[in-house]
């Protein structure tokens, strides 16, 4: 067969075939949705929940057990409020990041003894929030919450204001050192 000749059977088979119309638009794939920042949403939600459920006053904080808050018997709760509000300026600080429990206990004991011997009244202990620990549990913060009230040289302690470390630090009010005692 030559190029111009067509098979009659084929022509009979395709006699009622019509050309399909091409759509005037090209069907584009829709743009993918932007990624959802799940961790950011969880962090923002946690911050919101914490701000809504947190203690309303320092007195509430004492009862909640969430913050480091202690005032020695015989001391006024007003002293704790003044400590929290920055009445005493922070005279020295220690950072416990990277330490284990035993190291932290030893370093804090040495630091508090040395601070009291130097006549310091208000010091800061940076214990961290526990975000890097197993189960994101504040191990050193909990250790400070238990250890600080047991020390005779600690009159009061509380969670530091945001400017001094917030939930990752504690302010400690030390007993004034008597002259001649070390």
Image: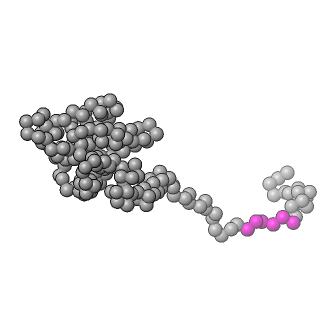
Residue 166 placed where, x, y %?
A: 31, 51
Residue 123 placed where, x, y %?
A: 21, 45
Image point 18% across, 53% down: which residue? 88
Give the overall secondary structure of the magenta segment: loop
Image point 13% across, 37% down: which residue? 117
Residue 29 placed where, x, y %?
A: 61, 59
Image point 18% across, 44% down: which residue? 175
The residue at the far bottom in this view is 24
Image point 43% across, 42% down: which residue? 136
Query: Is-magenta flag for residue 149?
Result: no
Residue 139 placed where, x, y %?
A: 38, 38
**Any part of residue 159 in sight:** yes
Q: Quadrant of the C terminus?
A: top left
Q: Is residue 110 above or below residue 27?
A: above
Between 53 and 155, the one lying in front of the other is 155
**Any part of residue 164 in sight:** no
| Lateral position of residue 107 relative to residue 22, left or right | left
Q: Which residues are magenta?
A: 16-21
| Lateral position of residue 163 relative to residue 135, left or right | left
Q: Quadrant of residue 108?
A: top left
Query: Is-magenta flag for residue 17?
Result: yes
């Amino acid at each position: 067969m030559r190029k111009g000749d067509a098979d009659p059977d084929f022509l009979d088979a395709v006699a009622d075939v019509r050309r399909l119309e091409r759509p005037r638009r090209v069907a584009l794939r829709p743009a993918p949705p932007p990624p959802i920042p799940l961790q950011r949403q969880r962090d923002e939600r946690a911050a919101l929940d914490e701000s809504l459920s947190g203690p309303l006053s320092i007195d509430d904080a004492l009862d909640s057990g969430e913050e480091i808050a202690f005032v020695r018997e015989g001391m006024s709760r007003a002293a704790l409020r003044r400590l929290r509000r920055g009445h005493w300026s922070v005279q020295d600080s220690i950072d416990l990041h990277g330490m284990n429990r035993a190291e932290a206990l030893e370093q804090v004991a040495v630091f508090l003894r040395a601070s009291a011997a130097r006549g310091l009244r208000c010091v800061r202990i940076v214990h961290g929030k526990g975000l890097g620990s197993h189960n994101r549990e504040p191990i050193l913060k909990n250790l400070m919450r238990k250890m600080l009230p047991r020390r005779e040289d600690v009159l009061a302690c509380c969670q530091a204001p945001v400017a001094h470390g917030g939930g990752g630090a504690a302010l400690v009010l030390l007993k004034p050192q008597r002259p001649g005692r070390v």
